[in-house]
Image (cartoon, rainbow, N blue to C red):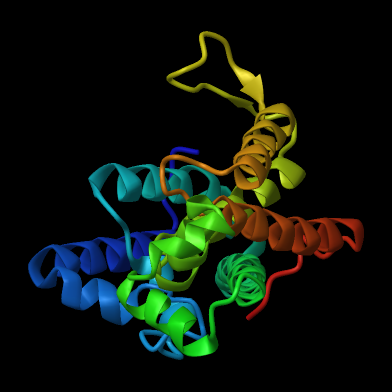
């Protein structure tokens, strides 16, 4: 994992340029390129792609780009550039799809709950756009459910993490016995053990709710799509066939 390949290098450079741009433009860039819920007025058709190059802070982009270099370069060497790019963006789009489907469920189940509690459609839309509502509704629904509805509708997703999780899973499938040395573990751990553990953690936090604002279902979506592609390619001996 010492060599950085050409495509991975270009992806890292683009991510860094986007990050610098967001530091200069601030909220304008985040509103334009982050991934908003598709029924939100802030959603734009290009956001499922551009959100992969947006990051919420220095540590966010640092860890993602480190993982892209460490785990993506061996895959590019094995697969070649076109196949690796297809995989990377497919995993990222898969992550966006699963994240959006979960948001759709949360938004519409929340709206149904409020309608059953006596709110009309215009009051719900006012809540979604302004965050304001008659607190009398709290006699019938919990404040937590209203918060989940509001955040699912309005909170944008950023980061390459969905695509990175696809890369992690593919690395684990292609190189399952590679021993990984991690800062927070005193001993090396094989990829086939470590990667399922972090995905399990995302699944638990996705179900129970994360206090850290992390899009766990996007991680799971990227991992799922990455697993399907990498498993199929390996099973069909397609992993050594390069696309030119």
Point out the residue furthest to the top here: 186
> Which image quarter: residue 24?
bottom left
- Whether residue 78 appears in this view of the structure is no
Point out the residue furthest to the left here: 24
162 or 116, which lies in front?
Answer: 116
> Residue 122's x, y, as percent?
46, 89
- Whether residue 228 appears in this view of the structure is yes
> Which image quarter: residue 212?
top left
Placement of 58 over or under 91, stated as above or below? above
Placement of 219 over or under 126, stated as above or below? above
Placement of 64 over or under 182, stated as above or below? below
Q: Residue at x 33, y 70 (%)?
A: 132
23 or 99, which lies in front?
Answer: 99
> Residue 33's x, y, as percent?
33, 78
Q: Residue at x 36, y 85 (%)?
A: 42
> Residue 96's x, y, as percent?
56, 70
Q: Residue at x 61, y 42 (%)?
A: 202
42 or 49, which lies in front?
Answer: 42
Q: Quadrant of the C terminus?
A: bottom right
> Which image quarter: residue 82?
bottom right
Q: Residue at x 66, y 36 (%)?
A: 195
Q: Taking 50 as reference, is 241 left or right?
A: right
């Amino acid at each position: 994992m010492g060599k950085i390949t050409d495509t991975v290098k270009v992806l890292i450079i683009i991510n860094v340029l986007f990050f610098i741009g967001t530091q200069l433009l601030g909220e304008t860039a985040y509103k334009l390129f982050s991934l908003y819920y598709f029924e939100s007025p802030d959603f734009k058709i290009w956001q499922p792609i551009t959100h992969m190059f947006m990051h919420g802070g220095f540590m966010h982009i640092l860890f993602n780009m480190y993982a892209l270099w460490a785990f993506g370069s061996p895959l590019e060497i094995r697969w070649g550039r076109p196949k690796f790019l297809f995989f990377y963006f497919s995993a990222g789009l898969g992550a966006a799809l699963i994240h959006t489907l979960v948001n759709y469920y949360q938004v519409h189940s929340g709206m149904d709950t409020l309608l059953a509690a006596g709110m009309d459609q215009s009051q719900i839309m006012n809540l979604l756009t302004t965050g304001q509502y008659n607190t009398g509704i709290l006699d019938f629904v919990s404040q937590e459910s209203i918060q989940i509805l509001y955040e699912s509708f309005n909170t944008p997703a950023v980061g390459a993490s969905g695509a990175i999780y696809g890369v992690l899973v593919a690395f684990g499938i292609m190189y399952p016995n590679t021993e990984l040395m991690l800062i927070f573990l005193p001993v090396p751990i094989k990829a086939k053990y470590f990667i399922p553990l972090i995905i399990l953690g995302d699944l638990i936090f996705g179900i129970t709710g994360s206090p850290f604002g992390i899009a766990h279902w996007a991680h799971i979506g990227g991992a799922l799509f990455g697993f399907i592609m990498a498993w199929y390619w390996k099973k069909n001996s397609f992993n050594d066939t390069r696309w030119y």
